[in-house]
Image (cartoon, helix red, strand yellow):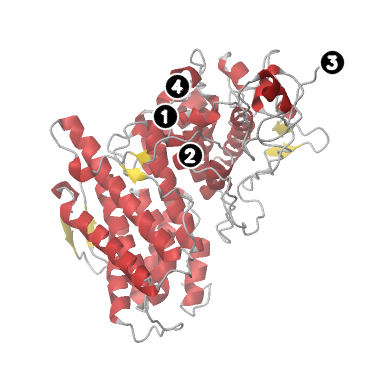
Amino acid sequence: MGKFRSRSGCLTCRARRVKCDETHPVCKACSKKNRPCQWEAPHTKFKDYQPSEATSSKSANIDGEDGKMEIDGYDGTDDEESLASRSRSPLANEDPGNRRAVPSESDGTSRSTSDLSPASFAIHSPGSAFSAEGPRSQNSISVASLLRQPVPEAVLSYSQGDFQLTQKEARLVHYYSEFLGRWLDCTDATRQFTLGVPEKVRKCSVLCHSVLSFAARHRREDAIADAAYQRCIALLIRRLNEPNASHDETLLCAIVILRFFEQLNVPSTTGSDAGQHLAGSSAILRASQGNQYVDPSAPTLREAAFWVYVRQCLYTATINQQPLDVDFSLQLHPQPSSMQDSHPLARLRLETAWANQMTWNTALIVNFCFETESSVEQNDKLLKWQGLWDLNQLWLRDRPKSFDPIWHGLVDDSCFPYVYFTADWHAVAFGLYHFACIMLHGFKPGPRFAIRTVENLSSKDRQILEHAHAICGACRSTPEIVQLSIILCHTIFIWGPLVSNPKERIEVVQLLEDFERANVWPTAWIIAALKVEWGLNSNSS
């Protein structure tokens, strides 16, 4: 009898191209030959992948009959190897007249994206209709797990040589490094996403297309953004099916960048965000188990990506008021307080560690506030709350003096105090500290009224507003630090209803409108929700 390759059998039989009887935990073929029988975890492959159209344009579509992806005439036949072997790339034939991306033809060695194996779930383009997600599977994969295993040199899936960028692609990569890398490096003094990612885009086309889609979307070049996004997804699917995908830091970086594209692409009036790439970081990638430590100084791009992911989780968790999809069994090592500032470069590592320590503290606090452990005794919850409060105040006391603002005070007739810092990570840590205080004040265990009157604020509410004023003042002082405005966008769901001063309301709305105008971040739906809470007409100024 002939031998057949097993598609759903153990990895050992599939590698040997023999039929597997799929007996768990050890199949008969492996048992007979005394071979290690290894199995693939669920949901590590895409099957029946059918990306829907991006909402900002009609440049991408799917042929329903054969499953091939078409982007402005592109037949979906390029793969990463063929892209790396030629000098022209998907945006090479862009028509500058209408700014629509017309990908060039690939060479004869390319493979069709339609040969993907059937899948267990589908991922949709940002902006597509979505429903509330159910509980996460126990087999979901945390991005943190990508940090637990050192990357073997042999599995770094770069191309053998650099592929040539077109002038238009180089312009977008330059735009990313000039303006957008800062979004990801806001707690990283070594600026790895700004300096390291542009160096790698010519070696990894998945990363390249994620950068192109993000930059084009921020520039409001929607057709180019959609084409690059769809191309990135097609390449990403293929790469995630490779056995060593979970060890590739460029894929992790591409996914966290795609998450920003996804957030910029949701409808501004509804805020409908399926969070596919955020969920994809934990539900698509399967990583090997390893140590239980994460370095807050982020010495590698892989660890820098982890801290970006944590901040992205904070945004989603606060808006939806749910626990974070983060592995909190991880421990920070080394602790920032144990690190020495003995060298100018060591100082960058130290400052990164303190900024990420505040990120981690905030994640712990938000997770505590939204976790649903009804079985926990009230006294135990109060003790845990007190421990988190002390942790937050310990950071404030022990952080380096460089994190102090260089000036703060009221300016003109603004309701919010202005505050200036010397570095982005100082300002973001400041915002996260006040965010953590808001959460701790708002979710302190103990008796509370289900309905509160805004007219008569309690002392706790006033404390919450003081911290909110600090965040608003930081946003107004330095609008170029985008992460501060992102913090404003999600924390406002906690403190926004408490704002009763008409002038303060106007300034808050102005901050949100300015943020969307400058950075394409959807805030109209947040403003509409606020006005409902304030009892105002959604069309009122």
Mark in front: 1 vs 4: 4
- Say left or right for 61 vs 451: right
- Say left or right for 444 vs 41: left
Q: Nearer the viewer, residue 397 or 521?
A: 397
Q: How crowded is mark 4: few (under 14 residues within 10 Å), some or many (20 or more)?
A: few
Task: Give the quadrant of residue 173.
Answer: top left
Residue 257: numbered disc: 2
Q: Mark 3 points at which residue?
A: 2
Question: Of helix, strand and loop, which one carries label 3?
Answer: loop
Task: Give the quadrant of residue 96.
Answer: top right
Mark 3 and mark 4 lie on one chain; the one further toward the N terminus is 3
The x, y position of residue 494, in whole percent, is 41, 68
Amino acid at pointer 4: Pro
Q: Name the residue under label 4.
A: 152
Mark 2 and mark 4 lie on one chain; the one further toward the N terminus is 4
Mark in front: 2 vs 4: 4
* CA distance for labels 1 and 4: 19 Å
